[in-house]
Image (cartoon, rainbow, N blue to C red):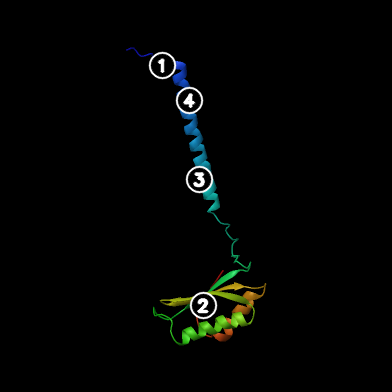
Amino acid sequence: MTRALPNNHNERKVLTERYSMKRSVIFVLMQSLVLLSLSCTRDLPEAGEEKGAAGGREIRIVFSLPGDDFAEGEDLEMRDAVAAAVTAGGHGEVTAMESGMGFMEITVRLKGEGGIGAVKKILFDLSPGVRYRIER
């Protein structure tokens, strides 16, 4: 039995078709990867302007507690009173309240332009002498 040697032109054609298919598959995979990475990104807010779901700015009020103890008793009552006053006054919506070792915090989605000034006044009235900072 004798075998015919493959025609060089046909062999080259088969190799070119395989290479072309591999290039197509790689191209499609790269496009999918780019689209996936673009869909996973989010718009970053402008400096100091974090947008919430309702379109208002979010702020965090972080209270510093003496020592490394967890908040209890008076501290929690003061935090709850501040959160209730912010909500009742219509200045914002409290989205989270947390406490940890040496701190408590309230996250507020502000309503309107004068919201932060009103929150500062509430803090001044309801938490005299308490150390806090407002993060935007």
Q: Earlier in the sequence, mark 1 or mark 3?
A: 1
- Check if mark 4's residue and mark 3's residue have beta carbons within 8 Å: no
Which-is-in-front pick, marks 1 and 2? Answer: 1
Quarter containing the N terminus: top left
The residue that mark 4 highlights is 16
Residue at horizontal 54 percent and vertical 54 percent from the top: 41
Q: Residues within 10 Å of mark 4 (few under 14, many from 20)?
A: few
Report if residue 8 is visible in the image: yes
Q: Earlier in the sequence, mark 4 or mark 3?
A: 4
Which-is-in-front pick, marks 4 and 1? Answer: 1
Q: Is residue 49 left or right of residue 23?
A: right
Q: Position of residue 94 (x, y in %)?
A: 56, 76
Which amino acid type is shown beneath numbered disc 2?
Tyr
Which amino acid type is shown beneath numbered disc 1?
Pro
Q: Residues within 10 Å of mark 3 (few under 14, many from 20)?
A: few
Q: Nearer the viewer, residue 24 or 48?
A: 24
Disc 4/disc 2 C-alpha distance (Å): 70 Å
The residue that mark 2 highlights is 132
- Check if mark 4's residue and mark 1's residue have beta carbons within 8 Å: no
- Check if mark 3's residue and mark 2's residue have beta carbons within 8 Å: no
Q: Nearer the viewer, residue 55 or 4?
A: 4
Q: Nearer the viewer, residue 65 or 5?
A: 5
Determine the secondary structure under disc 4: helix
Q: Position of residue 109 (x, y in %)?
A: 59, 72
The residue that mark 3 highlights is 33
Task: Give the residue furthest to the left.
Answer: 1
Residue 21 lies, with reference to residue 114, above or below; the image says: above
Q: Position of residue 92 (x, y in %)?
A: 61, 75
Task: Give the residue furthest to the bottom.
Answer: 74
Q: Earlier in the sequence, mark 3 or mark 2?
A: 3
